[in-house]
Image (spheres, rainbow, N blue to C red):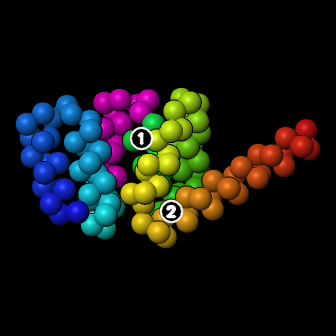
Amino acid sequence: ALGVYQLASLLMELDPSDEASRILCADALYQMGWVEEAHKMLSLALSRNPQRSPILARLALLQLKKGFMYDGNQLLKKVIKIGDTSCLLPIMDIFKDEDRKLMQTHCRSRALTILKNKRED
């Protein structure tokens, strides 16, 4: 992860607007356990392009990891509204096991709640 971080940082120096390098850098920071730094990196990327599902999904995980369920839900809702949920499966490979389980459990419980509410309506 450290080597990936260093490479991504160099790529960002060459082209500060390169979103892929910024995401790669944030993923490396996350893998090294530097969650706050990863969050800042993703927030900056999101400010430049607020409709990017891969960024929103990563931020959702970080919010859930911090215990901010409402914020995580709002970010996941944005991903769904954008309609580009294809980013979720590859991102799950990046997440650590405990965080993957957190995201899966959270999404499953939210989905069940939504289905239950629809049945009641």
User: Which x, y percent locates residue 71?
Assistant: 53, 49
Does residue 110 appear left or right of residue 9 in this picture? right
Residue 41 lies within the magenta run: yes
Q: Are marks 1 and 2 in contact (CB under 8 Å)?
A: no
Q: Circle 2 sits on which residue?
A: 100
Q: Amino acid at mark 2?
A: Arg
Q: Position of residue 91 (x, y in %)?
A: 43, 50
Give the magenta-colored segment's residue range: 39-52
Question: Alpha-carbon neighbours of circle 2 within 10 Å: few (<14), some, or many (≥20)?
Answer: some
Q: Residue at coordinates 55% horizontally, 65% vertically from top-left? A: 101
Per the image, label 1 sits on a secondary structure element best described as: helix
Near-viewer residue (121 or 95): 95
Q: Nearer the viewer, residue 108 or 77?
A: 108
Q: Of the residues shown, which amino acid type is indicated by label 1?
A: Pro
Residue annotated with mark 1: 54
The answer to whether residue 38 of the structure is visible from this angle is no
Q: CA distance from mark 1 to mark 2?
A: 15 Å
